[in-house]
Amino acid sequence: MFKNILALSALAPLAFGAAAPAQAKALVAYYSAHGGYTAQVAKTVAQAVGADLFVIKPDPDYTDADLDYNDPQSRVSREHADPSSWEKIPLKQTEPDNFAEYDTVYLGYPIWWGLAAWPVYSFVAGNDFAGKTIIPFATSYSSPLGTSDVELEQKAKGVYWEEGMRFGQTPSESEVTEWAKSY
């Protein structure tokens, strides 16, 4: 009889309408330039781990001319010359809907000059990541991850920051899936 009472007492909170523990919820927040490589990786990550997607959208968005890093007068070149502007890139929506519900945020971006694309700095600066786990990933043609994840980590206070991963422009779905599920 004593065993039955213990078993029932363990179930009591559920039996009397108390909420069950919440499931961990993941979000994939990403910025992708016109090539769409980061978007493809982000969608694969979201599918692999059952996460929601949030697209980081600059306002206004970058045009092809804006993204011409060979032109010293292009938007990205001018912004690169002024690092104080990176956290001030206007975004169409800074905080994802229901952001407080997410425990884990996969953060995706292309590499620009060995760093995260500038809109991602605005996203990180504009959100409270306290208590969340951040898992960064980046795409690039040939640049390494560099210090992009370290630079962003310094901007997001009170978080558990995982080591970042750099993917080439067209990683295999299995490569991305295996990496995403390793967390």
Image (tube, rainbow, N blue to C red):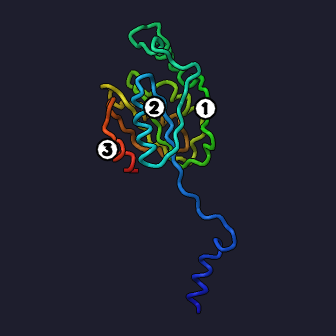
- 54 over 91 or under it: above or below: below
The residue at the point 47 percent across, 7 percent down is 73
Residue named by callout 3: 174
Q: Position of residue 165 (x, y in %)?
A: 36, 38
The residue at the point 41 percent across, 47 percent down is 48
Mark 2 or 3: the one toward you: 3
Say which amino acid is labelled 3.
Ser
Residue 24 placement, left or right of 14: left
- 48 over 124 or under it: above or below: below
Residue named by callout 1: 94
Quarter occupied by residue 17: bottom right
Residue 26 placement, left or right of 36: right
Among numbered discs 2 and 3, the one appearing first in the sequence: 2
Mark 3 burial class by Cα count in 10 Å: few <14, some 14-19, many 20+: few
Q: Position of residue 157 (x, y in %)?
A: 55, 40
| In-front residue for pair 135/93 | 93
Disc 3/disc 1 C-alpha distance (Å): 31 Å
Q: Position of residue 14 (x, y in %)?
A: 64, 71
Residue named by callout 2: 151
The residue at the point 53 percent across, 30 percent down is 56
CB atoms of marks 2 and 3 within 8 Å? no
Mark 3 or 1: the one toward you: 3
Disc 2/disc 3 C-alpha distance (Å): 28 Å
Quarter occupied by residue 61: top right
Say which amino acid is labelled 2.
Glu
